[in-house]
Image: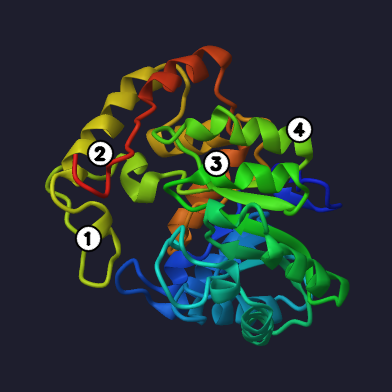
């Protein structure tokens, strides 16, 4: 496993880290014993950074992580979790006020829940789980989090981008409000390379890449007949003709991998890691075999400049993905 600096912190984190949404739920039925085995295996293979959230199974993911870390007896693993806004529109409406969605009372109470479920006195990285640029002129939730940082409740502060307006966090990076940004960046979603990632590099903001496989389609395992079980959020994400369109575009990438020695999922991870601003990528892992496959990518050859150039053409501007075509 290779390691990278995490922004301006002193942390050195595994470039392949553990995305813990699936072990909490939302991706179909999940056996908890298998979740525990998978997380142990990832840590055995060098992973030292885990990303979770309050919303991943209403705390189930955090509870499993706490159990595994107890079983490993004090091994240093960085755990990042997320606090969602108080109940309301998701993502927040431009007419919402920060005080309605991220008040100090709410943030303190929610973070105490995160501490309790994770079984710790201090959270390594606390991220706000989405945002609206309507609050950029007065980003007081981060001032509250800085106070909590001084109190020892959190070590670092971050934000998980709103997927329809990821560039809304650029001002926050430039203003020094955040230590890290979690962003969607993959072979289809390449827009962060235009400004967000360069600004992160300039400001020393750590970058956590999520959705590197575009919810699974960039593994190459889906086709137009793929269906998802009840309880799997991908029923909505790939509703209608979306699965067929996405699968066709994923397969169109494969010819450009000739000579790289990489499979499509391996190339998907290597593509995200090729940008110098990226600190780590957090593919979801719910089975031991996934942990082994994902972690093995760190030791494989990087994509050449020529291969990266060829892969740029697979950028897919999908601004109306959720609204239809």
For numbered disc 1, what is the local secondary structure? helix
Mark 4 lies on residue: 202
Quarter of the image containing the N terminus? top right
The disc, 2 or 3, on the residue closer to the chain's N-terminal end is: 3
Spot occupied by residue 30 in the image (x, y as percentages of width and height): 36, 74
In the image, 278 versus 285, the foreground residue is: 278
Q: Are marks 4 and 2 in contact (CB under 8 Å)?
A: no
Spot occupied by residue 248 in the image (x, y as percentages of width and height): 21, 32
Give the label, 3 or 4, closer to the camera: 3
Q: Which mark is residue 235?
A: 1
Q: Are marks 3 and 4 in contact (CB under 8 Å)?
A: no
Q: At 42% from the left edge and 74% from the top edge, which residue is drawn?
A: 88
Q: Which mark is residue 167?
A: 3
Mark 2 lies on residue: 246
How crowded pointer 3 is (Cα within 10 Å; few <14, some 14-19, many 20+) is rated as some
Question: Spatial distance from mark 3 to mark 4, Cα to Cα?
Answer: 15 Å
Quadrant of res 145: bottom right
């Amino acid at each position: 496993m290779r390691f990278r600096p995490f922004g301006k912190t002193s942390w050195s984190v595994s470039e392949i880290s553990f995305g813990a949404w699936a072990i909490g739920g939302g991706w179909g039925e999940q056996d908890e014993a298998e979740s525990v085995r998978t997380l142990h295996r990832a840590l055995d293979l060098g992973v030292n950074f885990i990303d979770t959230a309050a919303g991943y199974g209403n705390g189930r993911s955090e509870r499993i992580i706490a159990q595994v870390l107890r079983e490993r007896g004090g091994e240093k693993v960085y755990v990042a979790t997320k606090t969602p806004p108080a109940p309301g529109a998701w993502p927040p409406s431009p007419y919402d006020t920060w005080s309605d969605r991220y008040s100090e009372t709410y943030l303190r109470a929610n973070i105490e829940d995160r501490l309790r479920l994770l079984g710790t006195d201090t959270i390594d990285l606390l991220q706000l789980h989405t945002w609206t640029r309507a609050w950029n002129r007065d980003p007081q939730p981060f001032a509250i989090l800085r106070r909590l940082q001084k109190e020892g409740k959190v070590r670092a502060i971050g934000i998980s981008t709103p997927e329809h307006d990821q560039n809304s966090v650029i001002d926050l990076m430039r203003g020094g409000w955040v230590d890290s940004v979690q962003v969607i960046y993959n072979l289809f979603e390449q827009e962060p390379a235009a400004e967000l990632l360069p600004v992160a590099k300039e400001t020393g903001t750590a970058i956590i890449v999520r959705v590197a496989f575009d919810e699974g389609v960039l593994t190459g395992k889906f086709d137009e007949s793929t269906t998802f079980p009840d309880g799997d959020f991908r029923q909505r994400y790939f509703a209608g003709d979306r699965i067929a369109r996405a699968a066709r575009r994923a397969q169109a990438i494969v010819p450009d991998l000739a000579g790289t020695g990489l499979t499509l999922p391996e190339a998907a991870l290597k593509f995200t890691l090729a940008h110098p601003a990226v600190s780590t990528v957090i593919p979801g892992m719910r089975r031991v075999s996934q942990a082994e496959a994902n972690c093995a990518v760190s030791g494989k050859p990087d994509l050449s400049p020529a291969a990266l150039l060829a892969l740029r053409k697979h950028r897919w501007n999908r601004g109306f993905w959720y609204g239809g075509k």
